[in-house]
Amino acid sequence: MLSGPAAAQAHLASAQERTEIGADLVKLLAELVAIDSRSPAGDTAAIGVRIADELKQSGYAVQTVRAGQSANVIARIGQGHPCLAFNVHVDTLGPGDLSIWRTEPYVAVEADGRVTGLGASNAKGAAACHLWVARAIAQAGGPLRGEVVFTFVGDEENLGPDGMAELRRQGIVRPDILVVGAPTENQLIVAERGVFWVRLITRGRAVHAGAAPQGDNAIVRMMRVLSYIERELSPLIASRVGDSPGGQLRAMINIGTITGGEQPNSVPDRCEVIIDRRLLPSEVMADALLELERCALSAGEPAGTVSMEILVTSAGFQSRDDGPALAAFKQIIPLHTGAPARFVNAVGVFDGRYFANDGIEILDFGPGEGDQGHAPNESIAIDQMVQSALIQYDVIKVLLGLANSGG
């Protein structure tokens, strides 16, 4: 599928061009940051309109698919196979404690070669790059062969079904290659852990706090159950390690939220926690769910006082190591960064997981540092965005050619 030596395909921009590209990317990012698209509300209608307008102006065939609060934008150019799809989510978490922010979260602030704003790294910086690449591809006449698809989706931060999962379910996006925009510092992720969220519930009997011994405290019961899980299961999970091109992947478990009780003068009759479990690609989801449930039910509490509800499940994946997209990225990245391409591991999970069993090539690539996402004063380096945009433009040129560039 490669159409020629990578060096001949690369667009090695001059310093002036890079400055101009950087200014374009900052402008696009600022417009995206200014639009509130936080989850779990997940309303991406307004940002979807802005993105769709940009893509229509570039000549793309654009559709918007609504699911729940998500307005998922799909833009196409070219036709046939191979189908090269780029995906990025445009929903964010909320800003959290505003007193920690040094700037207004919804105003992009440029300083010292970086842009600060909510979602800058995860993943509106990648979205700005995809918009720039889409415009550049259209200006070059579109792909010489095959199709390029850009998807901008919501409901990713909530691990929900209304974003990329819905587009796959409806068969709207059927790629041969899927590149997911993620904060990888312009390096490559080809393996992700699976994840599930479950709600663990304990029940008791409510009485007045003045007669507490006559009641049955559900929070205290939950404390005993969690202590048992921490003692019996957590070390076993932590011992599970798997190899990936980015190094070792580790299985993990986290108690993310806890809720219980109405007020201090009442013994609570219900307590809930939500547990996040990260699975190695080799772990079986059903087995991991059963393992946790069995452990919780073995904590020694009376029958019927402990139960578990499954909220979200998503399998992990490890992509092929001989795919044409991976080969193209490995050739192009050094031409723009001056260093060999590296593999890194994902901290979170991204939308490629929905296609894990479809036999396609999947990889994560984009600007931004993983530890910036979901952090106060989130920021992204402008140089990384410029590199990312140029690398992805050249990868498309290598894989599919461009009509007006001799590809």
Image (cartoon, rainbow, N blue to C red):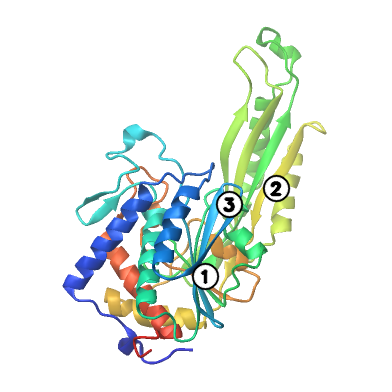
In primary-sequence order, the first of circles 1 and 2 is: 1
Tell me residue 309's x, y (percent).
72, 43
Q: What amino acid is labelled 2 in the image?
A: Leu
Q: Which residue is mark 3?
A: 159
Marks 1/2: CA–CA distance: 25 Å
Q: Is residue 360 visible?
A: yes
Q: Position of residue 230 (x, y in %)?
A: 61, 42
* Disc 1: which residue: 244
Quick one: 43 or 11, which is closer to the camera? Answer: 43
Between 318 and 37, the residue placed more toward the observer is: 37
Query: Which is nearer the eye, 405 or 330?
Result: 405
Name the amino acid type tagged 3.
Answer: Leu
Q: Secondary structure at mark 2?
A: helix
Under mark 1, the amino acid is Ser
* Helix, strand or loop for disc 1: strand
N-terminal label among 1 and 3 = 3
Residue at position x 40%, y 86% in the image: 403
User: Are the two marked residues, 1 and 3, in contact with CB atoms closer than 8 angstroms?
Assistant: no
* Up-down relation of residue 61 to residue 121 (above or below): below
Q: Nearer the viewer, mark 1 or mark 3?
A: 3
2 or 3: mark nearer the eye: 3
